[in-house]
Amino acid sequence: PTEPPAPAIPSKQSMVLSLLQRDQGATLDEMVAATRWLPHTTRAALTGFKKKGHKLESTKADGVRTYRIVAATGEAK
């Protein structure tokens, strides 16, 4: 009997992308906690998403910055 394949582990970039696609977006602390990356590595990943055509929105409320993907290249605005 063959065992079913183990489910694929999501990449850290896909985890960050999922957080950013939520309606409420994600804070830097949430992304760092999810990936265990350092803050500067997480910010570099955000830059990478921008270079890939994702449009990021950044808002700040009560001293906490939240990032969210609002569109990608080729999507209607």
Image (cartoon, rainbow, N blue to C red):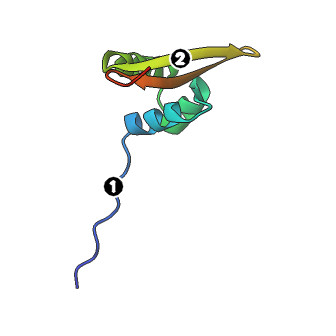
Q: Residue at x 73, y 14 (%)?
A: 63
Which amino acid type is shown beneath numbered disc 2?
Answer: Glu
Disc on the earlier residue, 2 or 1: 1
Q: Quadrant of the N terminus?
A: bottom left
Q: Secondary structure at mark 2?
A: strand
| Number of other residues with Cα within 10 Å of mark 2, as a class: few under 14, some 14 to 19, many 20 or more | few
Q: Residue furthest left?
A: 2
Task: Count the marks.
Answer: 2
- Kindly indicate the quadrant of the structure image that contains residue 53: top left
- Residue at the disc numbered 2: 57
Residue 18 numbered mark, or none? none
* Residue 33 in the image: above or below residue 58: below
Q: Secondary structure at mark 1?
A: loop
Q: Residue 48's x, y, as percent?
A: 35, 19
* Residue 18 in the image: above or below residue 70: below
Task: From the image, state whether disc 2 or disc 1 is nearer to you.
Answer: 2
- Kindly indicate the quadrant of the structure image that contains residue 6: bottom left
CB under 8 Å between discs 2 and 1: no
Q: In this view of the protein, which residue sits in the foreground, 77 or 39?
A: 77
| Number of other residues with Cα within 10 Å of mark 1, as a class: few under 14, some 14 to 19, many 20 or more | few
Q: Residue 52's x, y, as percent?
A: 31, 21
Q: Quadrant of the C terminus?
A: top left
Q: In this view of the protein, which residue sits in the foreground, 67 or 12?
A: 67
Q: Residue 8's x, y, as percent?
A: 33, 55
Q: Is residue 1 left or right of residue 48?
A: left
- Residue at the disc numbered 1: 8
Q: Residue at x 55, y 36 (%)?
A: 22
Q: Is residue 41 left or right of residue 67?
A: left
Q: Residue at x 51, y 21 (%)?
A: 39
Q: Residue furthest bottom?
A: 1
Q: Is residue 28 left or right of residue 38?
A: right
